[in-house]
Image (cartoon, helix red, strand yellow):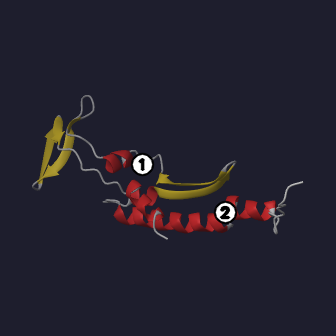
Amino acid sequence: MSLFEFKPAFKLDDAALDVMLKQPQGTVGRWMHRKGAEMEAAAKRDVGFRTGVLRASIYRTHSRTALGQKMIIGTRKDVDYAYDHHQGTPRHIILGNVGKMLTFRENGKVVRKHGVRHPGTKANKFLSKQLILLKTP
């Protein structure tokens, strides 16, 4: 027999702990929901837009997994230029389809060309720069 015997004064309630840590309505889940909503709103605020399609494609999902919970904030797959907008693009040449020409307006005149030199685009990290919001209380 040892000189000291330790008996904890509390007993863990596994069901309550499961709700708190792993359920969307638990303490952790509510925190994730609040932070996810802040990140989604900030991404929609910071994204560059002309038509609003990219802004409207930003979504958030929150679900339970075997290890706990997960939150995904991203863009729909049908907006194929979202990655280029986020990461930026180098200078490149844009060519018209076979047998067709590019048509656009320049200084009020209709211009037709076989190809153009695109100057590239600067990256707009509208999704990943929102991760800083997780550090604040």
Q: Is residue 26 above or below residue 88?
A: below
Neighbour class for label 2 at 10 Å: few (<14), some, many (≥20)?
A: many
Looking at the image, residue 83 sits to the left or right of residue 100; the answer is right
Q: How many marks?
A: 2
Q: Mark 2 vs mark 1: give the one in front.
A: 2
- 101 above or below 27? above
Disc 1 designates what residue? 79
Instruction: Report the residue that reaches farthest toward the bottom.
Output: 137
Q: Residue at x 48, y 63 (%)?
A: 134
Q: Quadrant of residue 25?
A: bottom right
Give the residue type at disc 1.
Answer: Val
| Residue assigned mark 2 | 24
Query: Residue flagged by tag 2: what amino acid is it?
Result: Pro
First reached walking from the N terminus: tag 2 or tag 1? 2
Coordinates of residue 82 in the picture (x, y in percent)? 38, 49
How far apart are the alpha carbons under marks 2 and 1?
29 Å
Judged from this view, the residue extending furthest toward the front is 3
Are there few (<14), some (14-19), or many (20+) residues within 10 Å of tag 1? few
Per the rendering, the mark at residue 106 is none
Quarter of the image containing the N terminus?
Answer: bottom right
When asked about the image quadrant of residue 117, the answer is top left
Disc 1 element: loop
Judged left or right of residue 107, residue 7 is: right
Query: Which element is circle 2 on?
Result: loop
Residue at 49% x, 71% y: name it.
Answer: 137
Relative to 32, is 130 on the left or the right?
Answer: left
Q: Nearer the viewer, residue 115 or 18?
A: 18
